[in-house]
Image: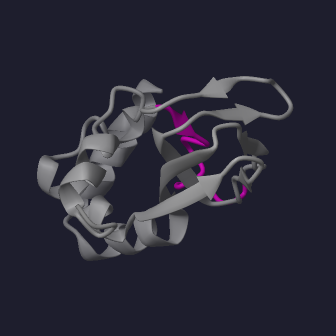
Amino acid sequence: PGPDAVLPKVVLLLSPSARIFADLLAIYVAEIATVAEVLHLVQGETICRPGETYIVARGVFRAKATHRFFRPGCVIQELHALCKELAPTEVICISTSATVLRIRETEIFELMLRLPPKFALGILKGLVRI
């Protein structure tokens, strides 16, 4: 599938590590998938900007400060797609190549304005679980 294919993105968004999206209806997860962006990285590249959450699709990443590893299915900066004021975590790609799904805070908030209140309530319910 191409980079804009929704189904692979939905599968990542529904991974057990992506707890913030666990309480959303499938139709809302698909809405997030349509605005999420696939990024391809190479070894040595760093990711993590304020207001962005990443879900690892392929490859391995390591947080520079904590040395924590992120493998496929792991979520990096889980709450950042909801709060751009959180300090970013510097994470480096340690695989020869890797792929992540990026979800931006601005796009999540645009969805909150456009979609029914159930969308925002589902996100809030996910936040309470974390």
Closest to the observer, 25 or 62: 62
Residue 81 is a magenta residue? yes
Residue 58 position within the rendered picture, expressed as x and y whole percent measured from the top left: 46, 40
| Image quadrant occupied by the N terminus | bottom left
Whether residue 72 is visible to the viewer of this picture, yes or no, is: yes
Residue 50 screen position, x and y as percent: 70, 59
Left or right position of 60 against 56: right
6, above or below 18, in the image = below
Q: Residue at x 61, y 56 (%)?
A: 41
**Residue 93 colored magenta?**
no
Location of residue 126 by image quarter: top left
Please report the bounds of the magenta region as a residue range.
74-85
Which residue occupies the foreground of this view, 46 or 43?
A: 43
Residue sitting at the far right: 65
Instruction: Write the residue at 52% across / 64% down.
Output: 104
Q: What residue is at 71 percent from the left and 59 percent from the top?
A: 49
Q: Give percent across and percent down for residue 129.
A: 41, 25
Decide: is 65 above or below 13: above
**Most common secondary structure along the magenta stretch:** loop
Work out whether residue 49 or residue 9 is closer to the camera in this orientation and state it: 9
Q: Is residue 12 left or right of residue 76?
A: left
Residue 118 in view of the camera: no
Tag count in the figure? 0
* Residue lying farthest to the front in this orientation: 96
| Along the viewing direction, whichever of 73 and 123 lies nearer the viewer | 73
Decide if residue 17 is on the left or right side of residue 50: left
**Percent x, y of residue 55:** 47, 44
Q: Residue at x 13, y 56 (%)?
A: 27
